[in-house]
Image (cartoon, grey):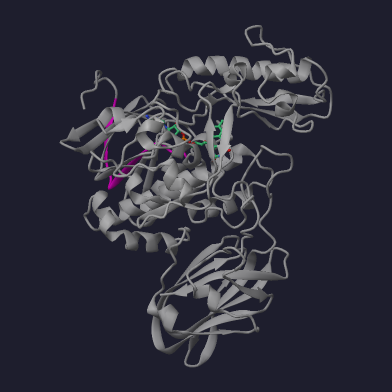
């Protein structure tokens, strides 16, 4: 790397895997890879993690359950863990505490080093492979170079596309090209725009607001998208508004600062409208926060070995290499965004999509740069498909798959593309780590499948090893325990038990997402059904002995290392967070 100035310090790092961009996708990909034993450097240009979900943007994470409209379909794995951690320590739904939850996850992850405030600005290639990437850390005035075996671009804007020559695309495909009925007739450069939100609070006393003279003025409700109904929410202004959106007809990257200036003029104009143009019942409401960093929806999308389309989504994404899933509707924002109202077009159109649909592994690695992967809004999908896959729950599902695939590739000295041959191993690893994959059941060790299952009550225990770890349709796929009930595996001979994994009840039918979008929306405590206290016993010489008493549990997935020769293992429910019964979705041993 030839830096123009050698006057600043330069630090060289080496890792197995380097991730650029610490939004939710980059964060989860990094944690997944590090947990599977590879060394990871995460280079992120902001002081806080989470991208659009961070306190800098405050966008709530949606996914295949569509705010719980499709119960039991939310993303589990690392996202579930983060959400439960957040419920435990952030009952007031504070976004700085959420930032801390994400930062703490990274601090607790072995093998993972983060470079915050460090913007990736260069890459060095060796033929079709990336040798290293470089970044500039503003807080320390230091250049960093990271050499790695595999790189992931989770920057949203795909900074590595420009730096490496990886094939990518920006704008909307034409209907004539893809056959997508939602696509415009011919390809164009339109994208879904960016947004600045605001947060307001009811202070209980009269609050005045004086808009800067450079802000826009909206005198009538009809001047705003969706008229009066779009900004009233029944007299509540907690967080507004996704339709303050621009940039889809500009360059989604190079025009960002220009768009931010315009967006702030609009946001302040909207707030002025609510406060000062007619009675909107907002007298005691005051501004609490303004988003100065525009949140983006779309810019460059990489081209992988497969490009997911509208038709794939509509047909349920039935791929042999499904490693992730989505389920949000195809929510195709008009490129004109806020200005769409002026041309009589709706700011967005929701097109039906099934939930869940599968997403193939081949959409997560570059078709021409041999060691480049991606997850997030920049994966290999068409514009139409992105209108569904862009929600963060889906980005995270792809990210856990990508990070896990990287670990497999590093551990077996394979390229990302070569992992396709080992797809079943990748799928089973993801299922073991509590990810959900539509139509792909979990397979178990013979220790699990050959053992006898015994329970203290009369409820059928077999669902804990039926391969499906959440309710699907009308089937609960769980064993239900009352307080004091137990479930045990009995082995036909003393066997070495490495670990026990449990998938416990964290109310799959409820919404655990942190959100400021709705009044009193979302939970602020660990679900009542979740086991707080339980015991794991092991049988040796025909006797049950306590192996571990788990107190203050709040997680769905619990892995307990045993490392002993035993004749059986037993789980006993002692206490929940309030409910009289609690389900066990998975109980496996190996
Ligand atoms: C207003 C708005 C509303 C939305 N509503 C929802 C919603 O309700 N629910 C939902 O789930 N999704 C929603 N989305 C979509 C969703 O937020 C994005 O698609 C999602 O954030 C993409 O995740 P990501 O990790 O790929 O990117 P980002 O969240 O954009 O994260 C990428 C990170 O990479 C960093 N980065 C960029 N360049 C560099 C570089 N050169 N070096 C180092 N780091 C870099 C950025 O700072 C950023 O933090 C919304 C988007 C917007 C704008």
Question: In percent of the image, x 64 and y 65: which residue is there?
Answer: 532
Is residue 14 located in the magenta-colored stretch of the structure? yes
Q: Dividing the picture into quarters, in which one does residue 94 lie?
A: top right
Percent x, y for residue 174?
Answer: 39, 30
Left or right placement of residue 242 versus residue 5 in this view: right
Question: In percent of the image, x 47 and y 73: which residue is there?
Answer: 588
Is residue 278 located in the magenta-colored stretch of the structure? no
Res. 434 in view? yes
Q: Nearer the viewer, residue 340 or 1?
A: 340
Percent x, y for residue 175?
Answer: 41, 32
Q: Nearer the viewer, residue 58 or 167?
A: 167
Left or right placement of residue 566 versus residue 233 in this view: left
Q: Nearer the viewer, residue 333 or 46?
A: 333
Res. 111 in view? no
Label the magenta part by its dominant secondary structure: strand
Q: If the image is split into quadrants, where does the C terminus sit? A: bottom left
Left or right placement of residue 382 versus residue 217 in this view: left
Q: Nearer the viewer, residue 121 or 299?
A: 299
Question: In percent of the image, x 27 and y 28: which residue is there?
Answer: 163
Q: Up-down: is 448 above or below 585? A: below
Q: Up-down: is 336 above or below 165? A: above
Q: Up-down: is 532 above or below 6? A: below
Q: Which residues make up the magenta segment? A: 9-23
Q: If the image is split into quadrants, where does the N terminus sit? A: top left
């Amino acid at each position: 790397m030839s830096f123009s100035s050698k006057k600043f310090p330069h630090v060289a790092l080496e890792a197995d895997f380097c991730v650029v961009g610490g939004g939710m996708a980059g964060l989860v990909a990094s944690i997944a890879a590090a947990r599977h034993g590879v060394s990871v450097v995460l280079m992120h240009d902001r002081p806080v993690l989470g991208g659009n979900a961070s306190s800098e943007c405050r966008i709530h994470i949606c996914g295949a359950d569509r705010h719980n409209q499709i119960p039991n379909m939310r993303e589990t794995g690392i996202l579930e863990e983060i959400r439960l951690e957040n419920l435990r320590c952030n009952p007031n739904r504070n976004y700085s505490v959420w930032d801390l939850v994400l930062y703490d996850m990274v601090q607790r992850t072995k093998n993972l080093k983060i470079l915050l405030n460090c913007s990736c600005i260069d890459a060095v290639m060796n033929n079709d492979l990336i040798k290293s990437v470089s970044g500039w850390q503003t807080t320390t005035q230091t250049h960093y170079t990271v050499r790695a075996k595999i790189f992931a671009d989770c920057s949203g804007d795909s900074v590595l596309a420009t730096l490496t020559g990886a094939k990518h695309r920006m704008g909307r495909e034409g209907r004539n090209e893809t056959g997508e009925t939602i696509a415009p007739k011919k390809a164009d450069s339109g994208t879904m725009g960016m947004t600045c939100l605001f947060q307001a609070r009811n202070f209980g006393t009269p609050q005045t607001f004086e808009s800067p003279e450079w802000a826009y003025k909206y005198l009538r409700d009809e001047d705003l998208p969706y008229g009066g109904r779009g900004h009233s929410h029944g007299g509540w202004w907690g967080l507004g508004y996704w339709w303050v959106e621009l940039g889809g007809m500009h360059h989604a990257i190079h025009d960002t600062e220009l768009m931010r200036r315009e967006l702030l003029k609009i946001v302040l104009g909207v707030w002025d409208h609510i406060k000062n143009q007619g009675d909107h019942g907002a007298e005691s409401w005051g501004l609490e926060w303004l988003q100065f960093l525009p949140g983006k929806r779309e810019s460059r999308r990489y081209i992988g070995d497969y490009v997911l389309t509208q038709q794939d989504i509509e047909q349920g994404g039935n791929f042999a290499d499904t490693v992730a899933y989505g389920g949000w509707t195809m929510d195709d924002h008009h490129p004109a965004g806020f200005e769409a109202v002026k041309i009589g077009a709706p700011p967005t159109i929701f097109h039906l999509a099934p939930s869940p649909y599968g997403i193939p592994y081949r959409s997560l690695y570059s078709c021409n740069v041999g060691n480049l992967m991606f997850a997030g809004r920049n994966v290999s999908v068409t514009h139409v498909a992105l209108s569904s896959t862009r929600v963060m729950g889906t980005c995270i599902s792809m990210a856990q798959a990508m990070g896990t695939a990287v670990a497999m590739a590093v551990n077996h000295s394979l390229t990302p593309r070569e992992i396709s041959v080992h797809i079943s191993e990748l799928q089973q690893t993801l299922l073991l780590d509590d990810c959900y994959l539509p139509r792909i059941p979990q397979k178990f060790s013979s220790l699990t499948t050959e053992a006898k299952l015994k329970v203290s009550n009369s409820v059928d225990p077999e669902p804990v090893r039926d391969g499906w770890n959440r309710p699907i349709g009308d089937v609960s796929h769980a064993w239900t325990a009352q307080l004091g009930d137990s479930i045990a595996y009995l082995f036909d001979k003393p066997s070495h038990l490495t670990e026990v994994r449990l998938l416990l009840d964290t109310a799959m039918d409820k919404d655990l997402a942190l959100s400021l979008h709705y009044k009193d929306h979302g939970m602020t405590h660990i679900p009542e059904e979740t086991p707080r206290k339980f015991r794991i016993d092991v049988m040796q010489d025909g006797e049950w002995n306590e192996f571990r008493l788990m107190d203050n549990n709040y997680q769905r997935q619990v892995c307990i290392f045993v490392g002993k020769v035993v004749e059986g293992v037993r789980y006993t429910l002692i206490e929940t967070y309030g409910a009289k019964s609690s389900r066990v979705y998975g109980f496996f041993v190996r």
